[in-house]
Amino acid sequence: FTAGGGFVPAAMGTAQEQRLMGKRYAVYVVGKTGKRTVLLYKNLADNQFEWVRITDNGGDWMAAAYNPRYSERFQRMLPRKIDVFDVAGGVAAKQLIVQYEFVDVQ
C-alpha cells in the first residue's frame, strides 16, 4: 500500500529489470532477512510501484495495489484496492486469497 502511494524505503539498492504479465518492471530488493525476501516491482511504463512480493519459509505471495484516488491529507494518489495472491505455484497460476478496499486513509 505505501509503495503504491509513492512512500518507499530510502535505501532500495539497484533494480533489475524483469518482465511480469507482459509488462516491464524494475525490481528492487527492499528486505532480506533469513528466509524472508521482500521485492518491489516498479512499472517502467508509468514509474508506479504496482506489486510487492514476499517469500518466507516456503510461502510466496504477491500483492497488487491499484484504483488510485487523490488524498488531500497526503497530497498524492493512493491506491484504494489491494489484492493479495498466493503465487507458490508460479505467477501465472496465482490464486487470489484476500482483497482489501479502502474508503478513507487516515
Image (spheres, grey):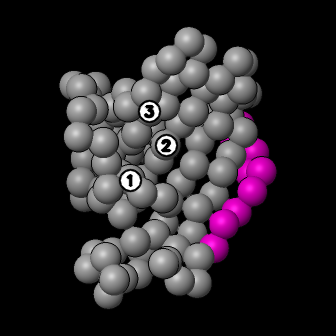
Type of the residue with mark 1: Ala
Viewer-proximal residue among 43 and 35:
35
First to last magenta residue range: 93-101
User: Residue at horizontal 26%, vertical 80%?
Assistant: 75
Extreme residue toward the front, this view: 106
Q: Is residue 102 above or below residue 64?
A: below
Q: Which residue is mark 1?
A: 3
Which residue is identified by label 3? 39
The tag earlier along the polypeptide, 1 or 3, is: 1
Q: Position of residue 20 (x, y in %)?
A: 45, 38
Foreground pick, 3 / 105: 105
Mark 3–mark 2 CB contact (< 8 Å):
yes
Q: Is residue 94 magenta?
A: yes
The answer to which of marks 2 and 1 sits earlier in the sequence is 1
Most common SS among magenta residues? strand
Q: Which residue is mark 2?
A: 52
Going by the numbered disc 3, the residue's amino acid type is: Leu
Tell me the CA gap for discs 1 and 3. Answer: 11 Å
Badge 3 crowding class, 10 Å Cα cut-off, few under 14, some 14 to 19, many 20 or more, is some
